[in-house]
Amino acid sequence: MAQITQPELQSLHELIWMEAAMHEKFRAYAEHAPEEHVRKLCDQLADRSRQHLTALSRLLDAERTGVH
C-alpha cells in the first residue's frame, strides 16, 4: 500500500473531526427527540457515525505506525 500524502492525511484528519461532530450531534438529538421513532433513528445514525469514526481512526493509526 502506498504511503498517504500530506494532503490526504489532512483530509483524513478533517473527516475524523467531522465524523466526531456528527456523532455528538446525533447523540444529542436522540436525547432530546420528542418521539420514540426519532430517538431510535438518531441512535442508529450515531452508532453508524461511531463505526465510521472507528474505521477512520484505525486508518490513521495504521498510517502512523506504518502497518497497512
Image: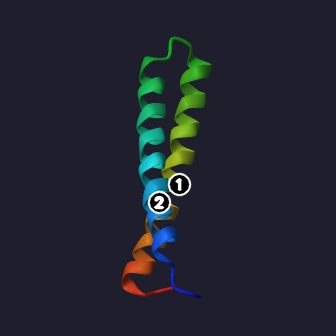
Indicate whether 33 appears above or below 51: above
Label for residue 54?
Answer: 2
Residue under label 1, please give it.
51
**x, y percentage for residue 28?**
41, 27
Q: Amino acid at mark 2?
A: Thr
Please identify the quarter of the rendering in which residue 45 is found. top right
Quarter of the image that includes the N terminus: bottom right
Who is closer to the viewer here, 15 or 38? Answer: 15
Q: Amino acid at mark 1?
A: Gln
Classify residue 25 as left or right of residue 48: left
Who is closer to the viewer here, 24 or 39? Answer: 24
Is label 1 in a helix, a strand or a loop? Answer: helix
Give the residue displayed 49% in from the left and 55% down from the top: 15
**x, y percentage for residue 49?**
53, 46
In the rendered view, how is the structure colored?
Answer: rainbow
Q: Are marks 1 and 2 in contact (CB under 8 Å)?
A: yes
